[in-house]
Amino acid sequence: MKAWRFYGFGDMRLDTIPAPDLRPGHVLVEPLCVQPSVTEAQLALGIPTLAYDRVKRRLETEAPVQLFGHEFCARILKTGPEETRFCVGDRVAARAKLPCEKCSLCLSERSSLCRKGPVIGFDLPGCFSEVASLPVISLVKVADNISNSEAACLQSLSDSIAAVETASIQMGDSVVIFGQGSMGLECLQIARISGAGLIITVDVRDESCQMSKELGADYSLNAKQCDVVATIRDLTQGNGADIVFECAGGSPKQGMAGTQTVSQAIDAVRSGGKIIGVSWFGGPMEIHVDLLRERSLRYLFPDISTQAHLEHTVRLVSSGRVRLGPTITHVLQGIESVPQAFEITANKGKFQAINPAQVILKP
């Protein structure tokens, strides 16, 4: 089969390698649609972010190696005789982070808390290939009325659901979301159906602000055109928002906000409010902890998404309560297009992309 393998940072090649064998507890699938996540697009270039050290170590010791490709829709080609949940022909999506099934948490039916298991695309091969082997424990069936392109976004959406769940939104809470990329727009929609009242979003791109309004924001502020903290305080009677989601931070090389939006989030939340840290920064940053303490602020990080979160994403998209289609702006054809998808995703502002660029591998 053909598969993309990495020989080093910035060096990915389309190789012909043996197709994987069917192993116990796994199914063989043909990827239909796959997209690089923003994190994967940065790691491919060697930009420090989530899992940088893990990827660097694998490249130094195992290259060439199959990496990335955890956001996908695939069709099952083959199952083992013991498999009862899935059949050949089923379309599936997957959660990326898996329990180890061996630690005390897993053995006491608290596997959702486990952090020792493998991650698809980082420790296990993902779906930038013509055939992939996937653990059954990671999979959910995709509803018939969800397109292949929408299904490739389900993993990201499940992480956004986990982020909003962490916020414990109360009915009518005012919410601010810094960053209107794919996860920011997902948090917007999930917050809306979870009981949020006033929702204010912030971005620096006109197309993202427009999309935000279309998907339910009451106000969408372009940070290049106004003092966003002052405007947020004006819109919240001078108090600040009850909850702020920070989804804009990260490497400025890729058009993200660095750590600036963290400071803005702290200034934009009311005293006693909550900040949900969705972004990954790739290194340490300074935070004025005494200010958080003085104002009784809570800086919270989302739990990893579970199988239940992923199953709920299918219901939300199938029922139309969350819309993914409008955010999919770049769709490429054929496995040879994968490097172009990485380039677009790593430079979304340049290409006016909102969701990561997708590659259709099978119709």
Image (cartoon, rainbow, N blue to C red):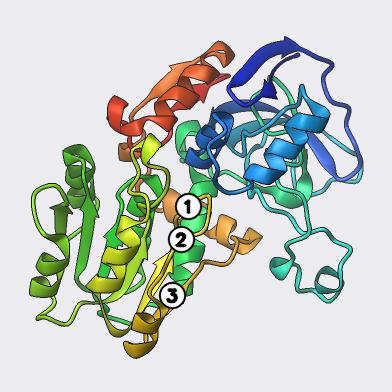
Q: Quickly name the residue at label 1.
A: 281
Q: Quickly name the residue at label 2.
A: 285
How far from the left and from the top, in percent, is residue 158? 52, 55
Q: Quickly name the residue at label 3.
A: 299
Contact check, label 2 and label 1, Cβ < 8 Å: yes
- The amino acid pointed to by label 1 is Phe
- Residue at figure coordinates x 54%, y 13% from the top left: 334
Q: Nearer the viewer, mark 2 or mark 1?
A: 2
Position above or below: 167 against 334: below
Crowding near pointer 2: few (<14 within 10 Å), some, many (20+)? Answer: few
Helix, strand or loop under label 2: loop
Task: Work out how far the residue at label 3 is from the one at label 1, CA to CA, in angstroms.
Answer: 15 Å
Residue 167 appears in the rendering: yes
Direction from residue 26 to residue 228 in the image, left or right: left
- The amino acid pointed to by label 2 is Met
Front in this rendered view, residue 209 or 266: 266
- Residue at figure coordinates x 82%, y 58% from the top left: 100
Q: Number of callouts in the render? A: 3
